[in-house]
Image (spheres, grey):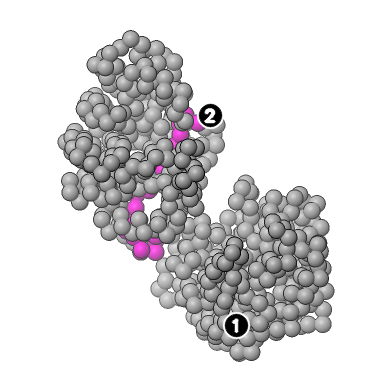
Amino acid sequence: MNNQDSARVRAWLEQGVLLFDGATGTALRAQAEEGEAVERLCLTQPQRVSALHRGYLAAGCRAIKTNTFAAHVSMACENEEDQRGLILAAFRLAQRASEGYNAVVFADIGPAPVEAQNASACYIGMADLFLSAGLTCFLFETMPGDKGLAEAAEHIKTRCPEAFVMVSFAADADGFTRSGEQAAVLAHRMSLCGMVDAIGLNCICGAYHIRRLLATLDVGDKPLSAMPNAGYPHVEEGRTYYDSDPAYYAQQVMGCVKEGARIIGGCCGTTPEHIRQIARLLGVNMPPRVPAAGGKTDSTHEKTCQSRILSRLEQGRRVMLVELDPPRSADIGGFMEGARQLEQECADAITIADCPIGRARMDSSLLACKLSRELGIEALPHMTCRDRNVNATKALLLGLSMENVHNVLVVTGDPIPTSDRGSVKSVYQFNSRVLAKFIRGLSESDETDPFFVCGGLNINAVRFDLELERAKEKMDCGVSAFLTQPVLSERAALNLEQARKTLGGAKLIGGLFPVVSEKNARFLQSEVHGITVDDVVVRAYAGLDREQGEALAVRLCEAAAKRIAPFTDGYYIMTPFQRVGLVCRVMRATRNLAE
């Protein structure tokens, strides 16, 4: 292995600032075939890749990246053999281009595929190919989180103790990555990993915002890196363009150096001219960086959550939550009256679905604010990932915090009905786990008051073991309690008991649904995803009129409540067909169990 490269990097950082190259992907995109990953140009048009490397080296950089950002299996590579060939080709192109220049080559590794079950295995697999080729300098860039990175760094250092490992996170102007985590928290956590040598930021933002974000990072005595985009892009006729003036960009990047960056370079939209302008301005022998003073870099939060639901649960008291569907029109008289009746029956909170089954209804968060403001009722609005991007979601959470609504139930959301997909488009920028992490990050950064974040638990799932694994991931992301699907089968009750054993740190609110008729039971059994109804329940409703059906519903809910009481922390009652009076009867029948 060429340990001289990693030694040179450390020597340069002792002397001053290390200048990297700029963008590869945006610079090569025009030369790639439609739909072709730019990494594959290492195999199909190697002269183009070599020319770009030489252009950056001639501009004055001392470190270039291999053209392997997305060289993961299932991304730029079809299989492991294809990956091996591409990575070796990319390494040779960069290595040959650097000959004759006083420069080193870094193995460029981007985020693991979203669908990857084991991120560390993806990173380690790529790293092993580079190590076998002789590379000892590594850049893990544009990372949305730190999953698998510490393990990969440890593996690299085990094989090559002298290796130099950099990790760079990608965050928006507010400091959040696309996984919903704060870059400051990620950077600090990574700084505690003894196997990582340098930490920083790249991509998403231009130099101005990267500079501001650098001031929030505390990475101890590790070198800090900054590789901003060339401003912000615009799209014309389906193509993305960056118009940042190289001289202006270089001045802004020098601001990052003043903020403490010891490693600088460019990301999307930058060219050899951008790097040439930085090299022209770059000084040496920069003073040591002072860590951010007083910045909050751990995941603790001094404020306490003001949720009355959480307060009751923390006192060891059971809760009774009732779900009311939001109105289909602007008439909220019936909804408000129903909520008032439920509150009088001592419901601890009203939960409000967010456009259930993908059909537009009155906004759950606005209704929650109205209940809180006008009736003083604790509300738990559902928040799906289906209809809002990150900007709209953050704006809504800020509004909820302002209105003193401190609870939220995060769900991925039912899909848009097939008949509406021509005119209604889903967003799904988050899933429920990422959304929970994003909400936690807003609270930790003091942008909102702390939220009591709940999640859903499908106790009727066919593979309940996988459902429990997802629930554990949700807990890791900040979910404190789970509201379950209704218990209408013995299997659901057994699964809920298993959940109590497995999810020890979470509160479990058991679902109850008052089935009102045989028709209702058959519909739930046959057409509603996520609900299992035992045949014995369906048969019990045969031939019953409305009054008899409601009486049976109360008895069955009471029996289910008794069955699950030992392994739940309360009940979550769903209101069928706006029958608030029926739910009040269920509440009275189960109240002694909820005390």
Label count reads 2
- The residue that disc 1 covers is 246
**Secondary element at tag 2:** loop
Where 166 sits versus 478, above or below?
below
User: Where's the N terminus, which quadrant?
Assistant: bottom right
> Residue, x 53% and y 71% (percent of image)?
232
Q: Which of the two discs, 1 and 2, sits closer to the camera?
A: 1
Q: Is 584 positioned to the left or the right of 466 in the image?
A: left
Residue 487 percent coordinates (x, y)? 39, 26
Q: Is 567 positioned to the left or the right of 5 in the image?
A: left
Residue 489 percent coordinates (x, y)? 43, 22
Residue 336 counted in the magenta span: no
**Secondary element at tag 1:** helix
Q: Is 387 positioned to the left or the right of 465 in the image?
A: left
Part of the protein shown in magenta: 442-462
Residue 445 counted in the magenta span: yes
Q: Which numbered disc flags the more N-terminal residue, 1 or 2? A: 1
